[in-house]
Amino acid sequence: MKNATSSWIRIPVIFFIIFGLMEYFIDSGDMPAIIKYPAAQFFMLMVLFLLIAIEMILQSVENVMYQTLSEEAKMRYGSAKSKSWEWTWGKNVYKKLLGSKPIEAEGEIILDHNYDGIRELDNKLPPWWVYMFYATIIFGVVYLARFHVFNGYDQDQEYAQDVAAARLEIEAYKKTAKDLVDVNTVELLTDASDINAGKGIFETNCVACHMADGGGGIGPNLADQYWILGGGIKNVFHTISEGGRDGKGMVAWKQNLKPLEMAQVASYVLQFQGTAPANPKAAEGDVWVDENTGQETAPQKVPDSTAVAKDSTSVVLK
């Protein structure tokens, strides 16, 4: 059988060439593409499998052809393969890159200077150093043309792109990890699926106290702009989670509902704002104004006999 070592060295060489080209052409910011993009990992894995499969096929074909040879031909073939794997090509490449003269040929490059018997050789710069120097010049020209002549992306643009991509990833993550929300991170849900889910939770657990239209009964009116414990998605979420006033308020639902379910029902409750219930309960609490609107945020006490205006179109949250 032939020595397969020389053939298998092609796999890592070709693999790293393809890997380098992929990293060069894929703009992945300050992170390698193979780390940032799962598709790149899958691609390189498929490349590796393909290279191994091709090498195995080539070796199988060569082995089959080898078995068809005569014994004498097999011996000649094995001898030739053995000699070819003496790293002669590697040694030749190394010598060319080093560019040094053998000791026997140093007489050709020795200088005439003689300092107490010490003489110098007129060695040229090693080719590997010269090639790297030329490579840096080429790189500098390409870099100059790309970023200063053709106005390629700069750090500000790269930062903006990374921030935009991160925000998209955060939004995608929130859609699949909504149960991780708490009172500090909860946001108003607007998707129809979330609102419908909140409606189902409300009709199952809340209508007995707040009525189906949010007009209130045992519990307060959810359609007006007056709130006992504060409005807005965070306050409503906190009230649902921790309960209302001690001794006479709503029970805490955090033991019965998941964070996502509390966010859904809180978002549904806020849908009652500005609606006109059939039999609204009198206002309780204070007017709550979203501090992000820039409007007056001081609470306004409402007398118990004051009814809530039903034609309000305010968007402030209950």
Image (tube, helix red, strand yellow):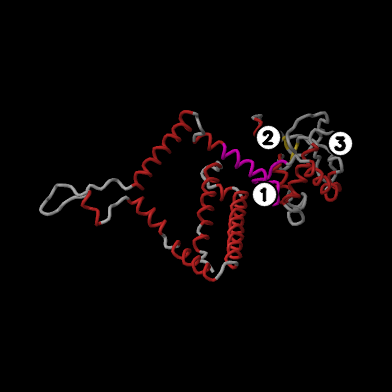
Residue at (52% x, 60% y) in the render: 7
Q: Quick one: label 2 or label 3, which is nearer the N terminus?
A: 3
Give the magenta-colored segment's residue range. Answer: 161-188
Dot 3: few (<14), some (14–19), or many (≥20) neighbours within 10 Å? some
Q: Quick one: label 1 or label 3, which is nearer the N terminus?
A: 1
Q: Quick one: label 1 or label 2, which is nearer the N terminus?
A: 1
Dot 2: few (<14), some (14–19), or many (≥20) neighbours within 10 Å? some
Q: Position of residue 18 (x, y in %)?
A: 54, 49
Amino acid tagged 3: Pro
Callout 1–callout 3 Cβ contact below 8 Å: no
Label 3, secondary structure: give it: loop
The CA span between labels 1 and 3 is 30 Å
Q: Position of residue 292 (x, y in %)?
A: 65, 33
| Number of numbered discs | 3
Q: Which residue is mark 3?
A: 277
Q: Which residue is mark 2?
A: 290
Q: Residue furthest bottom?
A: 71
Quarter location, residue 307: top right
Majority secondary structure in the magenta region: helix
Q: Is residue 8 above or below residue 196?
A: below
**Between tags 1 and 2, which lies in front?**
1
Residue 317 part of the magenta segment = no
The CA span between labels 1 and 2 is 19 Å
**Pick the front one: 303 or 158:** 158
Residue at (64% x, 41% y) in the render: 168
59 left or right of 118 in image: right
**Pick the front one: 73 or 179:** 73
Amino acid tagged 2: Asp
Q: Position of residue 1 (x, y in %)?
A: 54, 69
Q: Which residue is mark 1?
A: 182
Q: Position of residue 38 (x, y in %)?
A: 62, 50
